[in-house]
Amino acid sequence: MSGQGNLLEYCEQYACNVDAAVKAAMRQAAKDSPLSRDQICERMNLIAENAGFRLGGGNAKALSLALLEKWLNPLEREHTPPLRALAVFCRALDTVEPLRAVAHPLGAHIIDKRQALLLKRAEVDEKIRTLQRLKKKIEGDL
């Protein structure tokens, strides 16, 4: 997919409003986690603090459990996590599923470290095959 026009057409076709999908993925990740919602909130605040920012809005010094609950609640459509909070949530729960919900309508895929290494290996294998074909051609010309 290349060009701004194609991306816009793709988004229109596949509904780039990802809020509900992100919330669903976050909710499922929280449900699947051995951590309680309180522990998730604490972990997120710790990660944010160590990174030098805060997740709470307005005068809040930290993310509250109430706000986290709103981010996870599909009925709270006005409350969606900002990108920074989404990244912290993913780090806190060691998941990329909410990011997949963002990438999917764009035709993109989120892969983990192992998948990236497998892809890199396949690319190297393809280069080796190309060079071997070139080598055979050169040898034939000698």
Image: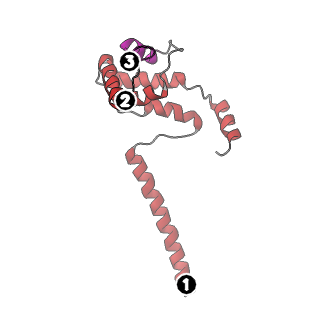
User: At x 36% / y 21%, what residue is drawn?
Assistant: 31
- In this rendered view, identify the residue nearer to me: 41 or 59: 59
Disc 2 from disc 3: Cα separation:
14 Å
| Amino acid under disc 3 | Leu
Task: For the C terminus, give its image quadrant.
Answer: bottom right
Find residue 140 and name its label.
1
Residue 16 place in picture, x, y as percent: 60, 29
- Which residue does the image show at 38% across and 18% down from the upper left? 63
Residue at the disc numbered 2: 52
Closest to the observer, 54 or 135: 54
Residue 63 shows which numbered tag?
3
CA separation in Å, label 1 and label 2? 62 Å
Q: Give percent across and percent down for residue 84.
A: 45, 28
Q: Is residue 70 left or right of residue 51?
A: right
The residue at the far right in this view is 5
66 within the magenta span: yes
Mark in the foreground, 1 or 2? 2
Near mark 2 (Cα within 10 A), the count class, few <14, some 14-19 or many ≥20, is few
Residue 5 visible to an observer of this rendering: yes
Instruction: Kindly state the secondary structure of the residue where label 1 is placed.
Output: helix
**The N terminus: image quadrant:** top right
Name the residue rendered at 65%, 38% in the picture: 7
Q: Which residues are magenta?
A: 56-73
Give amino acid for label 2: Gly
Q: Earlier in the sequence, mark 3 or mark 1?
A: 3
Instruction: Of the two numbered discs 1 and 2 on the same chain, state the one appearing first in sequence.
Output: 2
Q: Does dot 2 land on a helix, a strand or a loop?
A: loop
Instruction: Residue 56: give x, y in percent of width and height.
Output: 41, 18
